[in-house]
Amino acid sequence: MKLWGGRFETGPSEVFERFGRSLDFDKILIDVDLRGSAAHARGLRKIGILSEGECRRLVEALEGLREEARDDAFFNNAAEEDVHTVVIRKLKELVGAELADKIHTGRSRNDQVSLDVRLWLRERIDEGRRLLTGLMEELLRLAGKYPRAIIPGYTHTRRAQPVLWPHYLLAYFEMFSRDCERLGEARKRVNVMPLGSGALAGSGFPVDREMIARELGFEAVTRNSMDASGDRDFMLDFEHAANLVMLHLSRLAEDWILYTGEEYGWMDLGDGVTSGSSMMPQKRNPDSLELIRGKAGRVFGNYLALLVTMKGLPMTYNRDMQEDKEPLFDVARQMLASLEMARAVVETASLKEEAARAAAEESWAVATDLADALARKGMPFHRAHKVVGRLVLESVREGKSAKDWSGESLAAFAPEFTADMAALLDPGEGLKTREIVGGTGPKAVAAALEEAQARLKQMKC
């Protein structure tokens, strides 16, 4: 069954039918398509295209199809090209062809598809934000489990400065907080109602667009019918936000793949999120995190695919835009699955406090604390940097770590050092000098945790 055909002497070829068929992937839109059609029917009733009885019969049939569509068998043996024509066929079976055909009055598949995708995507965004806040909640719980633990912070994958474990986790909390905001911003642009735009020039019937928008929970209606017909910016906005979610998840995954490995060895993951080797009995692989990291590349590719599809299209709708859906659906699916997986990983994660502290102590991660101490005594920082750099070089040559030095030996090495500076050889002491807002000082981190908890309560979807 086609929604067009009078202009044509023959039907499309079998090759073209098969090539252009989208039902295999756009059937995911069935529920929102039925909801949108019910709202459109009520709009047609208001302007007299449908009688009260006709509207009631159509809406009841559409609601019944929503129930039926929950069964996977709903699409069995469907030969139609897309989800919309399946709905029309089933409507005709329920209410008759004459009444069913009225449902498309004043509506094009162009604005119908845009409506469906916006409704569907709005729900995926809401789900994504819920999963994000759940992940953030788990990060704060894990931070509170080891409130005073010290770990090495890294730059260039080399030990750099000691930081508190909660400070490290709060860094990811901030990333995911921005992601939640970005998804919220994308939702605002998704949540604009396009129905009434027609194919490109607007509907020829005075449907009450604002009424339909209110019924479907939209905040506004589109302002220009041509723009609405060719617009996929709202999808790109979502995919951009989803790409950053995946980027941040991938960075967390990379960290924890390293930190749980033997070379770092100061974190562990539960059995439920790791797997073994078919050959090597000793292996305990972080496959959950590797999959998250791998899926990030897949999501990035989908985003690029839509950008390239859209970049050269003339006004307004072009059939190329059918290619928007599979990448969009996959981006949403992979992002949601990855967020769910990440939360499960965080729930099982544990910190080996002594090993993490030893990693900070065994390196010269306290070097900056010593240089800062010299600068506080009046020495220009560049000179202090050189003095401490020479101390580190001497230690490396002699196989000494920071804890092998004392106040006396420091003063003997360089008179600029005073006995009290030896306390800074303990990474926990240097942390106390970093109480600036946003720093890793214990008081600053405690305040940041409290503030993060308060923000999370406001974010909860």
Image (cartoon, rainbow, N blue to C red):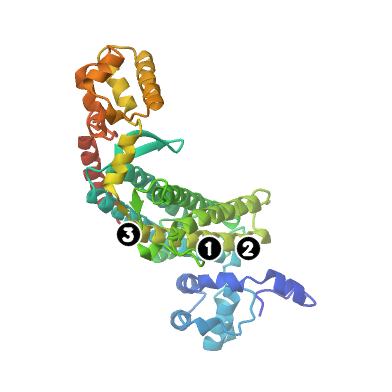
Residues at marks 2 and 1 touching, judged by CB atoms closer than 8 Å: no
Numbered tag placed on residue 322 in the rendering: 2
In front: 272, or 128?
272
Query: Could you say where residue 220 lies in the image, as x and y percent from the top left?
Result: 43, 55
Q: Which of marks 1 and 2 precedes in the sequence?
A: 2
Residue 246: tell me if it is visible.
Answer: yes
Q: CA distance from mark 3 to mark 1?
A: 29 Å
Q: Which of marks 1 and 3 precedes in the sequence?
A: 1
Query: As shown in the figure, which amino acid type bears the numbered disc 1?
Result: Phe
Please report the residue visible at 52 percent of the width from the left and 74 percent of the height from the top: 49
Query: As shown in the figure, which amino acid type bears the numbered disc 3?
Result: Thr
The residue to which callout 3 is attached is: 348
- Say whether residue 245 is left or right of residue 321: left
Determine the secondary structure under disc 2.
helix
**Label 1 Cα crowd, 10 Å radius (few <14 / some 14-19 / many 20+):** some
Query: As shown in the figure, which amino acid type bears the numbered disc 2?
Result: Gln
Q: Quadrant of the N terminus?
A: bottom right
Please report the residue visible at 27 percent of the width from the left and 30 percent of the height from the top: 403
Judge whether 406 appears above or below 266 on screen: above
Q: Which of marks 3 and 2 precedes in the sequence?
A: 2
* Mark nearer the viewer, 2 or 1: 1
Please report the residue visible at 56 percent of the width from the left and 65 percent of the height from the top: 113
**Label 3 Cα crowd, 10 Å radius (few <14 / some 14-19 / many 20+):** some
The residue to which callout 1 is attached is: 329
Q: Quadrant of residue 418?
A: top left
**Label 2 Cα crowd, 10 Å radius (few <14 / some 14-19 / many 20+):** some
- Say whether residue 422 is left or right of residue 340: left
Q: CA distance from mark 2 to mark 1?
A: 12 Å
Determine the secondary structure under disc 1.
helix
* Mark nearer the viewer, 3 or 1: 3
Determine the secondary structure under disc 3.
helix
Residues at marks 3 and 1 touching, judged by CB atoms closer than 8 Å: no
